[in-house]
Image (cartoon, helix red, strand yellow):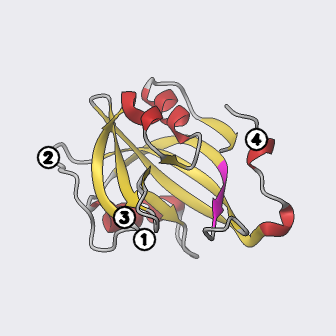
């Protein structure tokens, strides 16, 4: 893991409240299911399915809702893979950040699942695709450091607190 201190923005730039976020880690045949997104400047990036926990939801309810919205699938939640801290930029100028506690769960989709977007895809989401574990270092996967956690989980290593991504 990389040194957490280098990723922490100045305290004055963090927007409160801290937010819980859930992610679905879906691995099948040495591939991981990811959202493909396009930035305002046209650059392509990837993220795991998931998002913020709404008030009154359990973590599992949040994850089930996010997967329906983003990947049009009812996932089976198998268990907790990792917990991490992340700082998400809220603007292009990197002036303000939202601190998120990322709860990453092992999940599975039905055997006949074909990647497709749900009816309420994530902001800037343009697709859903299986990405080879070997390609993770070659793509822009957010948050930074997630590729290491995906590979660790895919190799069967147990849950950890990953610190700050």
Q: Residue at x 78, y 57 (%)?
A: 9
Query: Distance of mark 3 from mark 2, alpha carbons?
Result: 22 Å
Compare marks 4 and 3 and give the one earlier in the sequence: 4
Q: Please tell me in which quadrant of the rendered image residue 94 appears.
A: bottom right
Q: Which residue is mark 2?
A: 112
Foreground residue, 143 or 72? Answer: 143
Foreground residue, 87 or 163? Answer: 87
Query: Distance of mark 4 from mark 3, alpha carbons?
Result: 28 Å
Query: Distance of mark 3 from mark 1, alpha carbons?
Result: 5 Å
Are circles 3 and 1 on residues that touch, CB within 8 Å?
yes
Please tell me whether mark 3 sits on a helix, a strand or a loop: strand
Q: Residue at x 48, y 53 (%)?
A: 23
Q: Which residues are magenta?
A: 85-89
Q: Which residue is mark 1?
A: 123
What is the crowding at mark 3: few (fewer than 14 residues within 10 Å), some, or many (at least 20)?
A: some
Q: Which residue is mark 3?
A: 125
Q: Residue furthest front?
A: 41
Q: Which mark is residue 87?
A: none
What is the crowding at mark 1: few (fewer than 14 residues within 10 Å), some, or many (at least 20)?
A: few
């Amino acid at each position: 893991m990389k040194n957490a201190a280098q990723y922490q923005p100045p305290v004055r730039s963090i927007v409160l409240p801290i937010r819980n976020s859930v992610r679905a880690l879906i691995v099948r045949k040495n591939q991981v299911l990811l959202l493909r997104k396009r930035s305002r400047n046209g650059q392509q990036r990837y993220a795991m399915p998931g998002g913020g926990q709404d008030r009154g939801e359990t973590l599992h309810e949040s994850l089930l809702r996010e997967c329906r919205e983003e990947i049009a699938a009812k996932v089976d939640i198998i268990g907790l893979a990792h917990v991490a801290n992340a700082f998400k930029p809220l603007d292009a100028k990197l002036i303000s950040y939202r601190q998120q506690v990322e709860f990453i769960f092992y999940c599975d989709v039905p055997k006949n699942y074909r990647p497709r977007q749900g009816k309420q895809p994530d902001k800037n989401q343009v697709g859903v695709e299986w990405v080879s574990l070997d390609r993770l270092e070659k793509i822009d996967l957010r948050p930074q450091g997630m590729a290491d956690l995906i590979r660790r989980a895919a190799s069967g290593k147990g849950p950890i607190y990953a610190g700050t991504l």
